[in-house]
Image (cartoon, grey):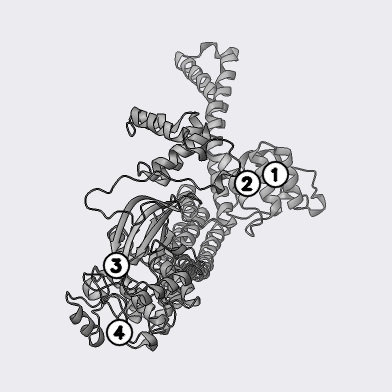
Amino acid sequence: MRDSWEAELWILVARGVLSMSEADGLREEARDKRRNPLALLVERGRLSEPSRQALLAEVMHDPDWQGTTAGRSARTYSMVRSPPPAGGEPAFPIAAWDRYSNVKFLGQGGMGMVFLAIDTRLRREVAIKFVRGDDAEHVRRLIGEARTQAKVRDERICKVYEVGEVEGKVYIAMQYIDGKPLGALAGELTVEQKVMVVRGAAEGIHQAHRAGIIHRDIKPSNIMVERGEDGELRPYVLDFGLARSAQEAGTTQAGALLGTPHYMAPEQAHGEAAKLDRRADVYSLGATLYHLLTGQPPIPGERVADVLQDLIGREPRPPRAIDPNIPIDLEAIVLKCLEKERSARYDSARALAEDLERFLNGEPVLARPAGTWYRLHKRLAKHRRLVAAGAVAIVALGVAIGWGIRNSDEAAERERLTRRFTEIAERIEAMARYSALSPLHDIRGDRAEIRARMDQLEDEIQRAGALAVGPGYYALGRGYLALGDDAKARDQLEAAWQHDFREPRVAYALALVMGHLYQQNLAAIEQTVERAGALDRAKQDPVGSERTEAVDGAFDRAKQSDELREAKKREIEKQYRDPALAYLAASLGVDAARADYVAALMAYYRGQLDEALRHLEEMGNGRPWDYEAPELRMPTQLQRRSVRVYRPCTDRSRISNTEPW
């Protein structure tokens, strides 16, 4: 049954009902659906039922489609002739031809008519051109060049399958291209697509040049463009060596002048056919590209004589003068092709194709002067993403280096200011220590002098600018710490910490301040507890049976506050003790205090009093009171439990470590 399908499809193609591509698609659809292709056409309304029955009868009575299928591809099937042409179209020149069967008329030109036909032996679509002409020598020459074209093996050259003569009519069987002429398609293409098509045509022309063929009639209508299933544009160069008359636009003048005036090279317009070389086709390719870009030929004109005269003595108008949006590199390529002197053009179609490829890739084109700035500009434009990334990297590196240098300078300046302010703070601490160790005296003068030094320090910090903020706050914090003003010391030190001046010495000073505040708040709670205990003892004393109601109320209030003591203690631990421990941990390695003393403070704040005592004894070689800095106040609870203060004795022989006061 599938054999009959094949016959039916070929008859439909021969009659023009289906194209070859439609027949292929219908064949695959019929196989997938396991249905007769004619039935599918009837359902779609493209074929009537009586026509279907007549077609089946015709197939069944044809001896070539009866019997076995072996070797059927090599048989010759006499296709049914197409109906007479309608609308005044020329009839197929060969009425009964078993080699090719007419499908439809495609068009005609000055040298012949073209028909779409079916090759009955190879079963493929072909374009049959019947050459017209009374000059037998001229016809033989054209046939010879067509046969030469058949030797060109390139996918961009329209293939010539056969050249022959039948019933006195010369014909050329060529590849059928289901596309449009480049001139008709130009309005649908972008600049890049136009360049790609001309580049492909130039590559095909180069292969023809290698075979010794000069086209002499390249123009938009002789480049057929087919769009593939993937959307790719495929150019095919047609009509090698076939001259045309100059009766209409796009035709050639009979006689020695071959080509189309609007697209022919100046030497070709001179009629110097013997001197033509491949650079004549380069000119025509440039003229074709010029027309695609500007919408007009490089040498416009209506009369052939005027065009030929201007072609020799008139320079084409620059494309950018017509359309400023045309890239300047592309204009240079076109104008190089259109040079009057052959030596100034590209020396081959391949050279033109390569320069067009450079344009598409964003590389410097040979048509423009090879200046250093131009080449650099093109390379930068081609690799703009890489250049942009590199520029960003260079800028980032420069910024990083500049930032590093700036940070280094700022760090050095900050360190200088830190040393300066620390020296001032140490002098303030020394003044406070001297005042504290001096005999009893009026310290108001000492404190006034210290305050004046603090004011001078603040003025110097303000003059030093932003870099002095952190070190300055630290120095002020140490000064207030030496004066015993823990609240102000805390404010200044925390300000230094918030301004990213977070050195171990700052952490150590903050730990001391937070520790002092913790001791003060803890002592207040202890006083409350002692008061509650005293009132409790007064309540249990028999003598106290005559206590007043006021004493009872005070006792009750003390008991209530005792219940809140633990909660208050936890609150101040969180507020002061925990930060003090954190700052002590951050101050390890600081030069301001010995490690044993820091360890003792940490143990004390954790409630490990015995451990704190051990560190103090190790620090003082058994005499913890020997080590004391005025700004470091030992916790009161630790003093009461561990610091041994010895009774004064005039007899030094009686001084003993075992006799506490």
Q: Inspect the image, locate mark 3, and give the three-letter code of the amino acid beneath it.
A: Leu
Q: Inspect the image, locate mark 2, and give the three-letter code of the amino acid beneath it.
A: Met
Q: Residue at x 66, y 36 (%)?
A: 607
Whichever of labels 2 and 4 marks the residue nearer the N terminus, that label is 4
Q: Residue furthest right?
A: 653
Nearer to us in this view, 165 or 384: 165
Where is mark 4, residue-wise? 266
Badge 3 density bin: few <14, some 14–19, many ≥20, Cα 10 Å = many
Image marks 2 and 1: residues in contact by CB distance under 8 Å: yes
Nearer to us in this view, 416 or 634: 416
Question: Quarter of the image containing the C terminus?
Answer: top right
Where is mark 3, residue-wise? 292
Whichever of labels 3 and 2 marks the residue nearer the N terminus, that label is 3
Q: Is residue 363 above or below residue 648?
A: below
Where is mark 1, residue-wise? 643
Q: Residue at x 57, y 31 (%)?
A: 526
Where is mark 2, residue-wise? 634
